[in-house]
């Protein structure tokens, strides 16, 4: 292209104009090709029948939402539909950023979503259903029968909102997950007493487990609808998509898609008839809940974060001291074992250790999520603390140790009176840094159902469709917890440093 442009500049003015026109037409053609591709986003991790990687062609996706996107693309006159992977909870934010035009993937119709984005008409009706263990099916008939029991669901969903709303009246305990596989696994394992999710997800999980691992209650807890979501400024395009969906309902193509994926049921014709009879859907919705309404939940989550961090750091200090002492004072086999532990823990991801302790050990011991979180964080940071303490102990001048031995002090007395106090001053700053890091790493424990500050913030952000206010609030809370600790450490360093002088 550069060579052609240079050639144009070297020819007569009329040829230069022709070349410029040709380049412009090529550019417009490329832009037109881009416009003729419908770029849509979804989460293939959600799996079938929504969106999943095609086993025959892993680089491609399949599912009823994939076919719905293709049908919309054809109805809009687009050349094709192109899929873009995005985490399910980030679909709303990504569509507003312009990463793609349309978000599909079991996206739920909620007032908050309609208030912040351009939302299509509902194209599928789902039921929120409870799944329980077979021995509980005669005792549990609804949320009212789950007082004091743990009920699992996906975070930032209609089901999660239902459980939170029912918490005060029924006394049940909502348990939030990041995926729809582990809730049912924990139900079978006895970690939770029920799961509330879409009937499509529940039926898929039951098929995966052979059809008898748990029971799906027939009476739905609530009714919901799947929609497509577009950026707030794309209301005109949304109206065109609505027209395509209405036509797909009339000509039967949408029904054929759902039948191919075995999700067609008697509720869908009722929905189609209601949509087609309505000349226009109500687009207005109440404004998203004010930030003040989320403050109690954020405060509870912050307390969980702080408690997990304090208990984990206490465990890390105790185990770290034992490891450091073993490396310095223990026999050869103890030094070898402590060295192996430290290197293995520091060389493997904390997230992997969380999964191993919570899920991997479930066949031996079923640890509560809160205890598993403390153990994983504490044992992980113990390896780092051990190296801090070992380095601090070895930093004490050998001349002082030899002088103490000359005075007849035992090694235990030397550690308690000479080496330990000085090593504590050396270790204080890195210990503080480790605690602040642990405070932030505690966000990872949400993967094993502990709803800490970052997880609650993510739920808040998904519900209102923006990370700006939730992100600022979350950052302020973390700063409020970490800055006083750093200030205290500096005061102790200054105080002990003055004494040492």
Image: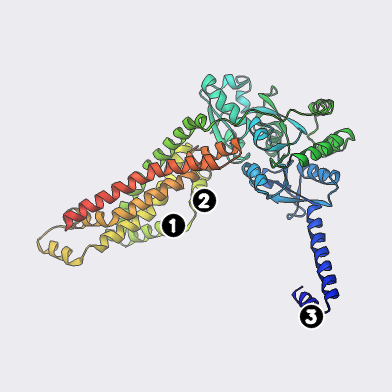
Give SS at disc 1: helix
Numbered circle sitting on residue 97? none
In the displayed image of the protein, which residue is found farthest to the front? Answer: 13
First reached walking from the N terminus: tag 1 or tag 2: 1
- Depth check, mark 3 against mark 2: the one in front is 3
Residue 484 appears in which quarter of the rendering? top left
Q: Marks 1 and 2, Cα distance to the nearest angstrom?
A: 12 Å
First reached walking from the N terminus: tag 3 or tag 2: 3
Q: Which residue is mark 3?
A: 10
Give SS at disc 2: helix
First reached walking from the N terminus: tag 1 or tag 3: 3
Q: Marks 3 and 2, Cα distance to the nearest angstrom?
A: 63 Å
Of residue 178 and residue 490, the one placed in the foreground of this image is 490
Residue 209: percent from the left, percent from the top? 67, 38
In the displayed image of the protein, which residue is found farthest to the left? Answer: 407
Residue 144 versus residue 309 in the image, above or below = above
Residue 65 appears in which quarter of the rendering? top right
Residue 168 versus residue 395 in the image, above or below = above
Of residue 394 and residue 307, the one placed in the foreground of this image is 307
Of residue 425 and residue 332, the one placed in the foreground of this image is 425
Q: Is residue 494 left or right of residue 105?
A: left
Residue 80: percent from the left, percent from the top? 82, 51
Q: Which residue is mark 2?
A: 352
Q: Which residue is mark 1?
A: 346
Q: Marks 1 and 3, Cα distance to the nearest angstrom?
A: 63 Å
Q: Is residue 380 left or right of residue 489?
A: right
* Number of numbered discs visible in the structure rendering: 3
Q: Residue at x 48, y 35 (%)?
A: 298
């Amino acid at each position: 292209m550069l060579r052609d442009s240079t050639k144009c500049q070297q020819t007569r003015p009329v040829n230069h104009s022709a070349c410029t026109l040709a380049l412009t037409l090529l550019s417009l053609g490329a832009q037109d090709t881009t416009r003729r591709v419908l770029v849509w986003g979804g989460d293939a991790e959600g799996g079938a029948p929504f969106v999943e990687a095609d086993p025959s062609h892993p680089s491609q996706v399949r599912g009823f939402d994939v076919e719905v996107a293709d049908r919309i693309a054809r109805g809009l006159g687009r050349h094709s539909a192109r899929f873009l992977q995005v985490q399910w909870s980030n679909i709303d934010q990504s569509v507003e950023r312009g990463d793609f035009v349309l978000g599909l993937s079991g996206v739920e119709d909620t007032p908050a979503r309609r208030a912040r984005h351009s939302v299509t008409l509902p194209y599928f009706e789902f039921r929120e259903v409870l799944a329980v263990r077979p021995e509980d099916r005669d005792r549990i008939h609804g949320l009212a029968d789950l007082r004091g029991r743990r009920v699992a669901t996906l975070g930032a969903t209609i089901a999660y909102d239902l459980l939170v709303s029912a918490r005060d009246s029924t006394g049940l305990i909502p348990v939030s997950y990041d995926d729809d596989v582990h809730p049912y696994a924990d139900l079978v394992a006895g970690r939770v007493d029920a799961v509330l999710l879409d009937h499509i997800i529940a039926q898929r999980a039951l098929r995966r487990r052979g059809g008898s691992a748990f029971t799906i209650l027939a009476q739905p807890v609530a009714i919901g609808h799947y929609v497509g979501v577009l950026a707030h400024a794309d209301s005109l395009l949304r109206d065109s998509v609505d027209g395509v969906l209405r036509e797909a309902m009339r000509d039967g193509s949408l029904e054929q898609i759902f039948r191919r994926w075995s999700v067609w049921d008697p509720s869908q014709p009722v929905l189609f008839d209601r949509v087609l009879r309505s000349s226009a859907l109500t687009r207005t919705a109440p404004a998203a809940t004010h930030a003040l309404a989320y403050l109690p939940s954020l405060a509870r989550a912050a307390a969980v974060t702080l408690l997990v961090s304090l208990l984990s750091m206490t465990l890390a200090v105790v185990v770290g001291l034992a490891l450091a002492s073993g490396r310095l004072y223990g026999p050869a086999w103890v030094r070898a074992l402590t060295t192996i532990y430290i290197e293995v823990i520091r060389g493997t991801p904390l997230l992997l250790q969380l999964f191993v302790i919570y899920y991997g050990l479930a066949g031996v011991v079923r640890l509560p999520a809160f205890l598993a979180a403390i153990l994983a964080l504490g044992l992980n940071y113990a390896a780092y603390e051990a190296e801090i303490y070992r380095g601090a102990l070895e930093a004490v001048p050998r001349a002082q140790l030899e002088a103490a031995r000359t005075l007849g002090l035992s090694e235990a007395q030397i550690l308690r009176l000479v080496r330990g106090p000085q090593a504590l001053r050396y270790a204080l700053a890195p210990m503080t840094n480790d605690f602040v890091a642990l405070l932030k790493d505690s966000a990872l424990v949400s993967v094993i159902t502990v709803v800490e500050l970052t997880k609650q913030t993510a739920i808040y952000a998904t519900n209102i469709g923006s990370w700006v206010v939730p992100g600022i609030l979350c950052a302020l809370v973390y700063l409020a917890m970490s800055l006083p600790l750093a200030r205290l450490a500096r005061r102790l360093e200054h105080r002990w440093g003055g004494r040492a002088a």
